[in-house]
């Protein structure tokens, strides 16, 4: 049973460090999900390509609920993910890693919760308001920062992520506004992925990889091609960072994530 999962974002489609990889189709109330499961240093690890293999699903069409439910059903307690981001912060340069600690949600059309009350397509037919003060798991963040430091990578131990609906990139005015609001980086996938993990009491953390400066900060036209090129250059480093982090994840969870539903349902 895999205890840890990796959700690979743009440019991270294959868990090449896993051995004896098998594929499973997991049935969920929200649809079927293809998950790869393999071994890494005696530990079973699940891997899921967020956009499907080859980036075939755009951010606003990802079945976030099916993905997170599938990992939970497999027994996963902890999720490490990657996300490609544009930077609003001149200190966070293309190629840098940012271990996210905060996020803001500006998405518009997604399914944000498992708890739809009576309409929930599963046995959890209640209403829940989970605490999301700190959206990322402190234990997983620590594992990521420790391994980034040991590997000598350029990284930032904190960063605020603004999640936009996409799939277009942002306007100059939107980026100016997000900067005033305190965002460091901008992307399209952390919401609702992070909150859905919290709703199932799973630990979640994400390492953002800066692929370019955002609109108006960069003088160049923004292209998805530059995102792909940078991710290809960084893919080895991302793999080392994720896999090294795994050994720093404590076996027992002492973080608040595991009790996210306590007091959240009003009972
Ligand atoms: Zn946690």
Image (cartoon, rainbow, N blue to C red):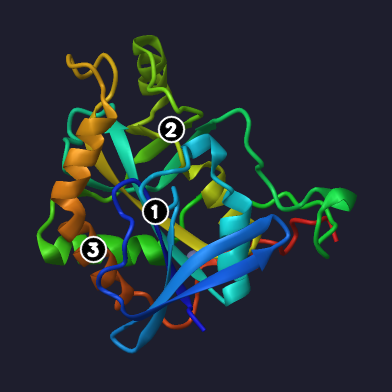
Q: In this rendered view, identify the residue nearer to me: 168 or 27.
A: 27
- Say left or right for 163 vs 82: right
Q: Position of residue 72 (x, y in %)?
A: 60, 69
Give me the C-alpha separation between circle 3 and circle 1.
17 Å
Residue at the spot 12% in from the left edge and 64% down from the top edge: 151
Ligand 1 within 8 Å of disc 3? The answer is no
Give me the C-alpha separation between circle 1 and circle 2.
25 Å
- Say left or right for 89 vs 119: left
Q: Earlier in the sequence, mark 2 or mark 3?
A: 2
Q: Can you tell which quarter of the image residue 56 is in?
A: top left
Q: Read off the residue under disc 2.
A: 162
**Residue 132 in view, yes or no:** no
Ligand 1 within 8 Å of disc 1? The answer is no
Q: Position of residue 33 (x, y in %)?
A: 57, 61
Q: Earlier in the sequence, mark 1 or mark 2?
A: 1
| Extreme residue toward the left, this view | 152
Q: Can you tell which quarter of the image residue 124 is in?
A: bottom right
Q: In this rendered view, identify the residue nearer to me: 191 or 137.
A: 191
Q: Secondary structure at mark 3?
A: helix
Q: In this rendered view, identify the residue nearer to me: 216 or 59.
A: 59
Q: Read off the residue under disc 3.
A: 239
Q: Read off the residue under disc 1.
A: 53
Pair 3/1: label in front:
1
Q: Earlier in the sequence, mark 3 or mark 1?
A: 1
Q: Secondary structure at mark 2?
A: strand
Q: Position of residue 25 (x, y in %)?
A: 57, 69
- From what the image shows, is residue 173 above or below residue 147? above
Pair 1/2: label in front:
1
- Say left or right for 105 vs 85: right
- From what the image shows, is residue 251 above or below residue 31? below
Residue at the spot 29% in from the left edge and 48% down from the top edge: 11
Mark 1 crowdedness (10 Å alpha carbons): few <14, some 14-19, many ≥20: some
């Amino acid at each position: 049973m895999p205890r840890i999962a990796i959700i690979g974002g743009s440019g991270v489609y294959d868990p090449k460090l896993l051995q004896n990889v098998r594929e499973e189709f997991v049935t969920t109330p929200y649809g079927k999900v293809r998950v790869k499961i393999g071994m890494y240093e005696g530990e079973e690890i699940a891997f899921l390509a967020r956009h499907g293999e080859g980036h075939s699903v755009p951010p606003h069409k990802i079945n976030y609920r099916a993905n997170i439910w599938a990992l939970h059903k497999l027994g996963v307690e902890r999720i490490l993910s990657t996300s490609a981001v544009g930077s609003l912060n001149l200190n966070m340069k293309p190629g840098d890693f940012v271990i996210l600690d905060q996020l803001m949600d500006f998405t518009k059309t997604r399914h944000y919760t498992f708890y739809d009350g009576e309409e929930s397509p599963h046995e959890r037919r209640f209403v829940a308001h989970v605490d999301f003060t700190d959206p990322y798991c402190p234990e997983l963040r620590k594992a990521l920062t420790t391994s980034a430091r040991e590997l000598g990578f350029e990284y930032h131990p904190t960063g605020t992520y603004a999640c936009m609906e996409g799939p277009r990139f942002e306007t100059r005015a939107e980026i100016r506004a997000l900067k005033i609001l305190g965002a460091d980086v901008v992307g399209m996938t952390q919401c609702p992925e992070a909150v859905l993990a919290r709703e199932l009491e799973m630990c979640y953390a994400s390492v953002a990889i800066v692929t370019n400066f955002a609109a108006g900060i960069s003088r160049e036209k923004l292209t998805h091609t530059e995102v792909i090129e940078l991710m290809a250059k960084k893919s080895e480093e991302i793999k080392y960072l994720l896999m090294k982090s795994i050994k720093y994840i404590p076996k027992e969870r002492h973080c608040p994530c595991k009790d996210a539903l306590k007091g959240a349902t009003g009972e």
